[in-house]
Every structure is written in structure tokens, then in C-alpha cells.
Image (cartoon, coloured by chain):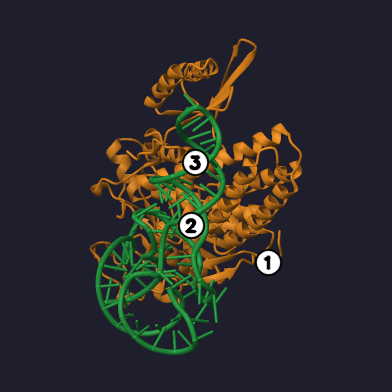
Chain colours: A orange, B green
RNA sequence: GGUGGCGUCGCCAAGUCCGGUAAGGCAACGGCCUGCAAAGCCGUCAUUCGGCGGUUCGAAUCCGCCCGCCACCUCCA
């Protein structure tokens, strides 16, 4: 690990700050997780992929990352949906927790160290409320407990929203429940009998939303920790309230660095069911999109910028991923061949490109996770590498090619887009073994690829072309490579 | 009304904090390679960064004004 940490944009100071963890090399990260009332959508996954990039990058950078992501498994929407569906809250939550984990796996998001659930930390939340009541930071109204925002002097430090300037919405007006100040928020909600509730000294009820993150982060890390992640929409009021209730209870600085990921929009507009532009990962997958292309698109735009998710952007991401994989594959092939005498010119050229890429890629990510910039530097190496691999009979030195491969593997520890499922088929034809490989397809189609190699060997180009057209019909493109053809899937990216 | 952000090549998108004369990807076009392709390579592709002023030897980057777009504003990542 280099001694100087990366610079990250801290929402608190609104500037880039050098990361200085409380107890290096450990970095404690708490990331707001999903409320499990529905299938996660692609916007959720932009955020989850980003938390993964933070996780993987800091790990790559030598930190010992301790990532905790909560699961909100009790809230108004969950209760509502469970009732509609006629299932228990637990079953509903369980179903969407599974969907969430499936999505993480699809997008190659590393598991967090733990996924604490709100319903498993009710006791800690009750303790926290009692502490706040004792310190006069909270008050009870008919079984509801509210946090008294006026009692916390620094309220608003994160988002700089001034109470008088806030737009009054119906939601605020309709949700008073006897609050003394509109800014006050529920720590504990008295609930009608019949709805799920937990016993507490101030009456049966269930916890307010903001409380769980304070309670669970404290359970994991104590009163103060390094880095708190969340979506842009959570800064206010969720995180503002977390700070207020946590610091009021502990008198400690709750979090050193806050980072927020900007939202994703679809075709230039906010994703919403009424606009018909609501996309879930499961739908995108079912439509035949490469998960790596989705991941690439989600991480290729700087996290503090809105990302416009379109079919065209997805296609472009797919093309970019194909290029990376193709170059990596060519490199592996060359390393395996080990033929030709190393050319000093090629070696020198590639060496320079590698060193530059190593330096610039890391520098870009160090500068507030500039993934777009980092990818730009990566592609400069890709071009040089391809050019050098094209110099037939004058390969770069083997050790250097191995070093380049090692570096590509290393950065893929962050990007996680190189790996692609493949299948291979072969056939004995006369005295030669014919081979073909590509992404998994139907065996009979793979057979046609082999038939085509035979046709080409026999110079029956008419048949070869017919077979190629036939395969193209079903979305498979064949690339000739002597007796070992490759195929790839034509870009089938479409979102729905 | 308040807060945050954005407007850079046909499309996507860095660069703006720390001013020095426009990364990268996709697409397109010409060439090499190929039986033909694909992939890859070589070359072409923004005298210009929403507009207008200002500061400066020099501005996409700093300052002012204006235009347009997006998001958030009390339980949506």
C-alpha cells in the first residue's frame, strides 16, 4: 500500500480529501443497502456496482476493507406489499433478499463482510432510543418517539438545507403525528394492533427508518467509523438524520467520510413505472444482455454524475468489453505459443505503454475514483498491445507479456469484466483436430461451426459462406482462425 | 423558492479543484490483412468545449451575466 491514500470527495466538506482511515490499513465502510419490497432495478445496481468498485479499489490499493451493507426488511412498503400479496412480511423480504443476492452475483459484486437485517437489531435500536430520551434529544407522543432536531446544533451539515427554504409537500403535512417541529422524525412508530410490532418501554411499535443504520453501524464499528456510502437521494433526510441521532447519542463524530452516488436515469428521464422506463436486472438479463456489458456501463461513468442508461449506451459498452476480452485472449495465445525471438523494439514499446498505463490508471482512480479516466488509460495500453502483437515474428519479450497479463488480471480485480463463460468443441478430421470455441451455445450450432472449418479446408467456400449466413441468422458470428475458429454472439443488447 | 449537478466530435464520455493550447470507447470512411469476412493494425474524423462579456501573454478550465437540461427538498439507490 502506498503511504498516501486516494483522494475521495467527501459530501461533508464538498471537496476531495485524502483518505486517512482511523486504523489503517483497515477501512470500515457502511453502505446503505436495499429495502427489500420489490425486485431491485438497474438504478439500484448502479449504486451496488459503485459500492463494489469502492470495495475492490480500496482492496486493490492495499487496504483491509470491512464492508457492511444493511438490509431494510421492515418498513411501510414491505408491510403494504406483503398484505397485497397475502404473504408474511418475512417471506416477502426473504424473496427479495434472494433477488438482491442473485443480482450481486450476476454483476460480479463481491459480498460484503455482513448484511445485517433491521429486524435482527431491534434491541440495539431500542437502547439507542432510550439513550436519546434520557439525554432529552427525543420525546414521546402517544407511543411514537420523535427525535428533536432542535436539540442537535449541527443539523444540516451534510446537505446544507435550511428548514425555512424547504418546499412543503403533502407528504410532510400528512405525516405529522403530533410532531413538535416539522423537521423532527420518527425513531419509533406506534402501530395499530395487528401490524408487526416489537415491545419497548415506550410502547409496542416498530423502528423508524433512519434509526436502523445508526444502530447497525454502531453494532459493527462502534460510535465512529471511516466511510459511509449511499445513493444521492439518501443524503437528505436519511443521512442527515443518522448523523443527528448518532452524534446526539454518542457525542462522537459519526462518520469521517460520506460519499454519495448519483442516480441513474433512463432515456434522459427518471425511472418510474408510470413512464414505462422501469428496468430490472432480471429483465435485462432475460433480454440476452451480457452482464459484463451492464457492469461496464454502470461503472464507466463517474459516480458523481448522472448516468443515462440507454440501449445504445449498453451496446457501446458491450463492444468495449468485447475489445478488452479479445485483446486479453490474443495476449494469452501469444504467451502460450512462446514462439519467435523477442524483438527489442516491440519490447521497449510495450514496456513503455505498460508503465504508463500502470501509473495513469492508478492515478485516475486515486482521484476520486475516476473510472472513465482510468478506462481511457487502459485502452491506450490495449491499442499498443494489439499493435505489438500484430508485428508477426517480432514479439515482445515473454517476461514482459507475462507482466502485462498480470497487470490486466490485477486491474480486473477492480473492473471484473474480462472473464467470460466459454465452451469449446473439437472434431477429428482426417489427421487434424479441428477446434472451435466461444460463448456457450447450442451443441448443434457449435457443430455447424466445425462443419464450416471442414468446408473451408476443402475450399468449398460456397458452403462455408452458407454456414456462416445460417449462423448469423441466429446471432452467431464466426471468426476464422485456421483450424481453430472462434465464434461470438452478435450484440443482442436490448433492454426489454 | 432552496440545494446539488450537468451542457465537450454523429453517440457515450474524461479533462474543470491546481489556466498552457481538447484522453478514451462506440459508430463512420480510406488502406493493410483475409477466399470473402471478422478481429487487429495504419490513417481520417472538435482550430473547438451552451451563449455573451471580462481577467490573462494564454481559458473547456478563473470571474460576471444569460440560455437550456436533470436530480433532490422528510422513509426513492
- For label 1, the residue is A4
Q: Whole-percent x and y of residue A331?
A: 64, 39
Tag 2 secondary structure: helix
Q: Whole-percent x and y of residue A311?
A: 35, 44
Q: Callout 2: residue from which chain?
A: A
- Check if mark 3 and mark 1 are on a common chain: yes
Question: Marks 2/1: CA distance?
Answer: 30 Å
Q: Is residue A296 above or below residue A286?
A: below
Q: Is residue A210 above or below residue A461?
A: below
Whether the residues at callouts 2 and 3 have beta carbons within 8 Å, the answer is no
Visible residue check, residue A34: no
Visible residue check, residue A406: yes
Q: Whole-percent x and y of residue A468?
A: 43, 23
- For label 2, the residue is A213
> Could you tell me which residue is drawn at 70 percent across and 32 percent down?
A337
> Could you tell me which residue is drawn at 54 percent across and 60 percent down?
A369
Question: How many residues crowd around disc 1 within 10 Å: few (fewer than 14), some, or many (20 or more)?
Answer: few
Q: Whole-percent x and y of residue A190?
A: 34, 56
- For label 3, the residue is A292
Q: Is residue A140 above or below residue A99?
A: below
Q: Quadrant of residue A283?
A: top left
> Could you tell me which residue is drawn at 61 percent across and 49 percent down?
A384
Question: How many residues crowd around disc 3 within 10 Å: few (fewer than 14), some, or many (20 or more)?
Answer: many
Q: Horizontally, is B52 left or right of A261 in the view? A: left
Tag 1 secondary structure: loop
Amino acid at each position: 500500500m502506498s503511504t498516501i491514500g486516494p483522494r475521495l470527495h467527501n459530501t461533508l466538506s464538498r471537496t476531495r480529501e485524502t483518505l486517512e482511515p482511523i486504523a489503517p490499513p483497515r477501512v470500515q465502510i457502511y453502505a446503505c443497502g436495499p429495502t427489500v419490497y420489490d425486485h431491485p432495478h438497474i438504478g439500484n445496481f448502479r449504486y451496488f456496482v459503485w459500492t463494489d468498485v469502492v470495495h475492490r479499489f480500496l482492496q486493490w490499493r492495499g487496504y483491509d476493507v470491512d464492508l457492511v451493507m444493511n438490509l431494510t426488511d421492515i418498513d411501510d412498503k414491505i408491510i403494504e406489499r406483503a398484505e397485497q400479496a397475502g404473504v408474511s412480511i418475512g417471506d416477502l423480504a426473504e424473496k427479495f433478499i434472494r433477488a438482491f443476492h442473485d443480482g450481486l452475483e450476476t454483476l460480479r459484486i463481491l459480498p460484503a463482510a455482513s448484511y445485517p437485517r433491521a429486524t435482527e437489531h431491534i434491541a440495539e435500536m431500542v437502547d439507542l432510543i432510550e439513550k436519546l430520551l434520557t439525554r432529552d434529544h427525543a420525546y414521546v407522543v402517544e407511543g411514537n418517539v420523535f427525535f428533536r432536531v432542535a436539540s442537535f446544533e449541527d443539523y444540516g451539515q451534510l446537505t446544507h438545507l435550511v428548514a425555512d427554504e424547504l418546499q412543503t409537500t403533502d407528504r410532510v403535512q400528512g405525516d405529522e403525528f403530533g410532531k413538535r417541529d416539522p423537521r423532527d422524525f420518527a425513531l419509533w412508530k406506534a402501530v395499530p394492533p395487528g401490524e408487526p410490532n416489537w415491545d419497548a418501554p415506550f410502547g409496542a411499535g416498530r423502528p423508524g427508518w433512519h434509526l436502523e443504520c445508526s444502530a447497525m453501524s454502531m453494532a459493527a464499528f462502534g460510535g465512529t467509523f471511516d466511510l459511509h456510502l449511499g445513493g444521492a437521494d439518501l443524503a437528505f433526510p436519511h443521512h442527515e438524520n443518522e448523523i443527528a441521532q448518532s452524534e446526539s447519542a454518542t457525542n462522537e463524530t459519526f462518520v469521517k467520510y460520506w460519499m454519495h452516488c448519483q442516480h441513474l436515469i433512463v432515456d434522459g428521464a427518471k425511472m418510474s413505472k408510470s413512464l414505462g422506463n422501469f428496468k430490472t436486472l432480471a429483465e435485462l438479463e432475460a433480454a440476452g444482455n451480457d452482464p459484463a456489458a451492464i457492469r461496464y456501463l454502470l461503472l464507466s461513468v463517474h459516480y458523481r454524475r448522472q448516468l443515462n442508461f440507454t440501449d445504445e449506451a449498453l451496446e457501446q459498452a458491450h463492444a468495449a468489453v468485447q475489445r478488452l476480452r479479445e485483446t486479453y485472449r490474443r495476449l494469452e495465445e501469444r504467451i502460450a505459443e512462446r514462439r519467435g525471438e523477442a524483438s527489442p523494439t516491440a519490447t521497449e514499446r510495450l514496456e513503455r505503454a505498460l508503465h504508463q498505463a500502470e501509473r495513469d490508471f492508478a492515478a485516475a482512480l486515486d482521484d476520486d475514483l475516476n473510472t472513465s479516466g482510468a478506462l481511457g488509460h487502459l485502452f491506450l495500453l490495449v491499442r499498443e498491445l494489439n499493435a505489438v502483437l500484430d508485428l508477426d515474428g517480432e514479439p515482445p519479450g515473454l517476461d514482459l507479456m507475462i507482466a502485462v497479463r498480470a497487470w490486466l488480471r490485477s486491474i480486473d480485480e477492480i473492473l471484473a469484466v474480462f472473464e467470460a463463460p466459454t465452451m469449446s468443441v473439437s472434431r477429428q478430421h482426417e489427421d487434424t483436430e479441428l477446434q472451435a470455441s466461444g460463448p456457450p451455445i447450442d451443441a448443434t450450432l457449435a457443430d455447424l461451426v466445425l462443419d464450416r472449418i471442414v468446408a473451408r479446408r476443402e475450399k468449398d467456400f460456397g458452403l462455408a459462406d452458407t454456414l456462416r449466413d445460417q449462423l448469423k441468422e441466429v446471432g452467431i458470428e464466426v471468426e476464422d482462425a485456421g483450424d481453430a475458429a472462434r465464434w461470438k454472439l452478435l450484440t443482442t443488447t436490448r433492454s426489454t
